[in-house]
Image (tube, rainbow, N blue to C red):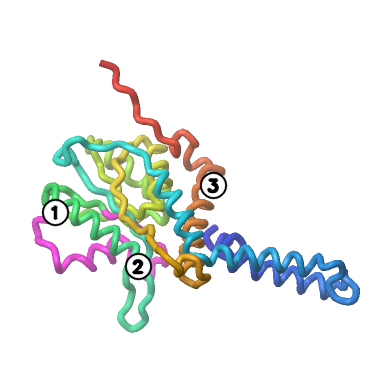
Amino acid sequence: MKILVSLFLLPLGLLLLALATLAWLAWHRRYTGGLKGGAGAGLLSGVFIFTVLCSLPATGQLLQSTLAGMIHGRSLNDPSQTQAIVVLTGGMTNAGPIGWLPRPETVQRLMVGYELQRAIDLRLPVIISGGFTQGVQAPSEARLAAEYFARGRSEITPTELEEVSTDTAESAVQLAPVLHQRGLKNVLLVTSDIHMPRALAAFRARGIDPVPAPAITVPTERGLRAWLPSVYGLQLTSAALTEIYGIIGYLLQGKIAWADFVYAPLEIKV
């Protein structure tokens, strides 16, 4: 699914798809004397303009801010009521000779998780969720992330690993029974801000109503740079679109319901 999204639904993929379409039309000679009537040129121009717009940091920032603005969930009046902290990993990368390393998203999320633990109670369990996304020949994302931070933490700091899930929905499936069995209701959920709405919905669909504790990733680019096309802007827009497609995919696959995504706090009757 992620591969298909990357190839066909992100800006660069759409541009390549348009070029491939034009090449196919030309090869079949559907247009005599080139691209008759400017239809092909119009298609290419439209996709090119779309790609340029998507490469503006301002566009990516707007989309990401919109996603972050959709974070609605519970809050705890007293942080000491927290019973556990769940951190969702954000991928890892093969660094060649030095082996696998957690991606910056994973590092940032876990930093937030451990900082929350330090601020609230060092005895709080931090549950890191992330399985063998790169196959069994590579370590699980959860174990890699835990080992990355192990040297700087005290032995009193408890860390648990969930190493089966390979995506957000599976994390909810794997962790929901554990949290229910332990009677853990006040759980902080840590993930990137743009990923938080989908993550919250996935856990709510499994009967868990976590408290959002997002790692802030939405940039605040200002001035002229925000309106100049760049690879950075394309990365921002692609990340936002990937998350939007993820939400749509979860809804279509029945992994979440619209009621899980659009959260309304339950009214407590006195």
Relative to residue 130, is residue 78 depicted above or below? Answer: above
Question: Toward which corner of the image does residue 147 lie, by quadrant?
Answer: bottom left
Does residue 24 appear left or right of residue 76 in this picture? right
Give how far across and how far down residue 260 sits, in percent: 43, 36
Check residue 143 for magenta coloring. Answer: yes
Check residue 224 for magenta coloring. Answer: no
Give how far across and how far down residue 257 sits, in percent: 49, 37
- Mark 1 residue type: Arg
* Residue in the picture at 19% in, 35% down: 77
Dominant SS of magenta comes to: loop
Of helix, strand and loop, which one carries label 2? loop
Of helix, strand and loop, which one carries label 3? helix
The residue where tag 1 is placed is 118
- Mark 3 residue type: Ile
Q: Magenta part of the protein: which range?
A: 128-157
Classify 10 Å Cα crowding around label 1: few (below 14), some (14-19), many (20 and above). few
Of helix, strand and loop, which one carries label 1? helix
Q: Please state which of residues 239 and 233 is positioned toward the viewer in this rendering.
A: 233
Residue lying furthest top in this view? 270
The residue where tag 2 is placed is 103
* Residue in the picture at 14% in, 40% down: 80
> Which of the marked residues, 2 or 3, is nearer the chain's N terminus?
2
Give how far across and how far down residue 13 sits, in percent: 60, 67
Inter-mark Cα distance, 3 to 1: 36 Å
Relative to residue 40, is residue 207 depicted above or below? Answer: above
- Mark 2 residue type: Arg
The residue where tag 3 is placed is 248
Contact flag, marks 3 and 1 (Cβ < 8 Å):
no
* Residue in the picture at 33% in, 67% down: 104
Q: Please state which of residues 136 and 8 is positioned toward the viewer in this rendering.
A: 8
> Which of the marked residues, 3 or 1, is nearer the chain's N terminus?
1
